[in-house]
Image (cartoon, grey):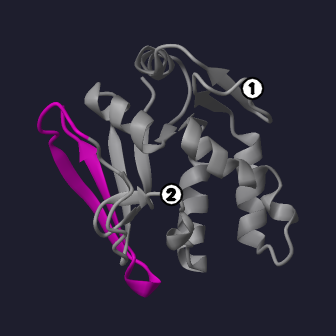
Amino acid sequence: MRKLVYGMNVSLDGYIATPDGDLGWSEPSDELFEFWLEEERAIELFLYGRGLWESMRYWQTGDQQPGTSPAETEFARNWRETPKVVFSSTLAEVEGDARLFAGDAVAEIVRLKEGDGGPMRVGGAALGGAALRAGLVDEVTVVTHPVLLGGGTPFFGALDGWVELELVETRGFAGGVVLQRYRVGR
């Protein structure tokens, strides 16, 4: 069975985006960017909700922007080459190495987990929350930034009950950013 990871940058008060959807508060340092690049290299399939997909599409051409670092260039290449499934009932199409899925997201994630292949990463609070509530997430990676947003899109939405987590890694980055990686209990 494939491993499913849910992880994102999070504000100290638990949000992944501001009320208007801005993610700019989480601009990574070079060290943190390198961390995310290594994380993404280990993933064989990205699962995105519509909102995060629209933000991540930047990487289709992100390496062509002035002043792009070597790590950003490699991140863009890796992102373009990694297969993706975009879960949306409102998009008409997706580009690049992605396919659109408009049906039951949880059922599709179950099907994908039961298939062959390496680790998958689910991104987006709504999709990640649905996968977590369904008991499909194996690992949670929280990269907490020292900023309070005061509202927005929560990393963890409402759950149906307790989810036991086992801390397996803690790591600090420049600027007070902290990684915590958890194994999800069953």
Question: Which residue shows up at 74% across the image and 31% down it?
Answer: 94
Above or below: residue 172 compared with residue 82: below
> In the rendered structure, which amino acid carries the disc numbered 1?
Glu
Mark 1 burial class by Cα count in 10 Å: few <14, some 14-19, many 20+: few
Nearest-to-viewer mark from 1 and 2: 2
Q: Are marks 1 and 2 in contact (CB under 8 Å)?
A: no
Above or below: residue 85 compared with residue 21: above
Asked whether residue 131 is drawn in magenta, I would say no
Q: Secondary structure at mark 2?
A: loop
Tag of residue 93: 1
Q: Position of residue 85 (x, y in %)?
A: 62, 29
Tell which of 155 and 19 is nearer to you.
Answer: 19
Q: Position of residue 17 (x, y in %)?
A: 46, 58
Above or below: residue 138 compared with residue 35: above
Position of 44 compared to 182: left or right?
right
> In the rendered structure, which amino acid carries the disc numbered 2?
Asp
In the picture, which quadrant includes the C terminus?
Answer: top left
Q: Position of residue 42 (x, y in %)?
A: 57, 47
Provide the residue span drawn in magenta.
Answer: 158-186
Residue that carries the numbered disc 2 in the rendered image: 20
User: For the view shown, which residue lies furthest in the bottom direction?
Assistant: 175
Position of 183 compared to 152: left or right?
left
Tell which of 111 and 103 is nearer to you.
Answer: 103
In the picture, which quadrant includes the N terminus?
Answer: top left
Position of 69 compared to 55: left or right?
right
Q: Secondary structure at mark 1?
A: loop
Return the disc, 1 or 2, that comes first in the chain's sequence. Answer: 2
Position of 160 compared to 94: left or right?
left
- Which quarter of the figure has residue 159? top left
Tag of residue 30: none
